[in-house]
Amino acid sequence: MAVHTRSDSVSCASAAEALLVSMEARGASVIFGNPGSSEIALIEALADRGSPEFILGLTEPAAVGMADGYAAVTRTPAVVTVHAGPGLSNALCALGNAQRGGTPLVVVAGQQDSRHLSQDPILSADLVALADQYCKSAVQVARPEDVPAEFARLWDLARTFPTGPTFLAVPMDVFGAGPVMVTPPAEVMLDVPADAETIAHVLDLVRQAASPAVVAGDQAGMDGAEDMLSALCAAIDAPLYAEPAAARMVLPFTDPAWRGYLPLSPSGVRAALADHDVVLVIGARPFTRWLHEDVSALSPEQTLVVADPRAFRPFPCRTVQVPASPAAFISGLLDALGVDRPMKRTSGAEAAVQIGVLPAEETQATVVAGAPSGAAVIADAEGRRPTIPDALAALLAALPADAAVVDDSVTGEGYAREILERTGVAEYYSCKGGGLGWGVAFALGVARARPSRPVLAILGDGTLQYAAPALWTAAHLGLSVVFAVLRNDGYGILKWVERSRRGDDAAAVGLDIEDPEVDLVALGMAYGVKASRADGPREIEELARAAWPGPYLIDIPVDRAVLDYE
C-alpha cells in the first residue's frame, strides 16, 4: 500500500503499485486491459487500491480499441494493458489503427520473468521489436524503480505533437518487486512553434495565390485546432478538405469552409484540388493512399505547404515544409493576418465535462436529427433487401441529435458521409488504419469517455466478426451504443477491388460469409446485448428509434450488389 513520505513523494509496495500511482499523478482514472499471468502483480495492486477503474476487454483488440476511442474523445493518453508475447501480437492490428490515427496511448505489457528469459519460456517474445513499428517509443525496463519514471516519460511523449502510442514492457518479477519510491516528475509537453520568418513566407504564398485551399489532418483535431482552422479558412477565403481516410472530424460538416473528405486515390486528390494553386496541409503527411497508381496527387504547377515535422515523400511541385504543430502554425498565421484567434481547445477542460458521470436518466437521447422520417426509405415492392444507401438513409433518419457516429462500414462510409454532411452530426469517427474490427471497440471507448452522448456504430458484418467479444463490455457497462450491422454476407470492399482489377467479381474466392449464414442476432445476445433483425427500410428506422439508449445490435440485411468505393 502506498505511503506518503512527503508532499510530492510516495512509497509503494511494488513497481505495479508505483505504476498506478504514476497514472493517477498524470490524471488517468481508467485502465483498459486484458490481463494474463505476467500482469498478475498489477491486477493485485488494482484490487488493493481500488483505483484506477479497470475496464475489461475479452480480447486484446477490444482493450486497445476501447482505449483508442476513449483517448480520441479526451485528447489525453489512455492506458491499456496486454499480456506478454501472444497478447501483444493479438493487439497489433488495433495498435496499428491507433498509430495511423495519431491516438495517444500508453500500452503496458507484462513480460515473462526476467530470471529465465534466456531459456525462452512460454509467452516470451521480443516485445519492444513487436511494438516499435507502431509506437513513438517502445522500452522494456529492468528495475522496479524505472517503472514510474518511464511511464511518466511515455505518457508525456504520447501526448506531444505528433501524438501517438507508446509502449512499456515490464517483466513479471519486476512488476512484483519493491518497495519503489515515486516522485512524480514535472510534466513535459513540447509544442513545436513556427518561426516568424517562415510564417511570413507562407503568408506571402497565400496572398499571391489565386485559389488557396486547406487540407486538415487528424493531428489538427487532436491538437485542439478546429476553431482556429475555421477562422483561418474564413480569413484567407479558402475551402477546407479533410485528409484522405481522416479518423476524426476536423470541422463541423455545417461549417461554410467544409468541402468533405479527400479520396484515397492520388488521381482523386488531384481532381479534387486541381483548381487550387496553393495547398496548405496542416497536421498530416500528404496524402494517404491505398491502391497503387502511378500518378502524383498534385501537379508541378501547384505549391504545397506542409505544417508537420514528420518526413514525407517529395512531390513534383514546389514544396515548403514547416516543422510546426498544427495549433502553433495556424495561430502564427492568424496573428500575422491580424485576426483574433479562437482559444485552442484544451483536453483537460473538455475531459472534465466529457468524463463527468451524469445521472442515468440524462443519458437517453430524445431529440432526433437527420433526414425527415420516411425520406428515401420506401420499401421495395418485391421484398428485396434494401441497398446500402437506402439502409443508411433509414438508419440515419433516426439518429439522435447529439449522437457520435463511429463508422466502420467500409463500403458504406461514403454514403453515410453524404447523408451526414447534409444533415449534420455531433461527432464522426472513421478508421484511418484500415484494420477491420476497429469500430466495435472504438465506439465503446467513445461512449465511456462521454456518457451523456449516445453512440451509433455503423459496421459491416465482416468487421463485426473481428471484434465481436467487445460486445460483452458494452453489455457489462451498460453503454449507450447501438451497433448497426450492414450485412451483405461477404467482403464487399474486396469484391470492389476484384471488379476494379478484372472487371468482374464473380470469380472471387473466399469473399462470401454464407452457408451457413451467421446469426448476428444470436451473436449479440450471446454477449448480453439485445438484438433484432430489421428487414426493410421502414423497419430499420423504427428499430433504430427504439434501440436507444442501448446497448443494442441491429442486424440489417442489405443488397449484395458490389458498390463503387472511393
Image (cartoon, helix red, strand yellow):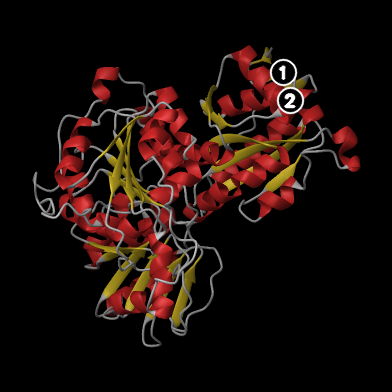
Quadrant hosting residue 115? top right
**In the drawing, does residue 562 fall left or right of residue 396?**
right
Instruction: Report crowding for label 1: few under 14, some 14 to 19, many 20 or more residues within 10 A (C-alpha).
Output: many
Using the image as rendered, state which of residue 251 and residue 171 is in the foreground: 171
Disc 1 to disc 2: CB gap under 8 Å: yes
Using the image as rendered, state which of residue 141 and residue 37 is in the foreground: 37
| Image position of 438 with respect to 533: above or below | below
Kindly tell me whether residue 398 is visible in this rendering: no
What residue type is disc 2 on? Ala
Label annotation for residue 12: 1
- CA gap, disc 1 to disc 2? 7 Å
What residue type is disc 1 on? Cys
**In the drawing, does residue 50 fall left or right of residue 500?**
right
Place of residue 24 in the rendered image (x, y in percent of width and height, measured from the top left) = 56, 25
Q: Which residue is mark 2?
A: 15
| Image position of 97 with respect to 563: above or below | above
Residue at the image point whose x is 41% and y is 44% from the top: 518
Disc 2 on helix, strand or loop? helix
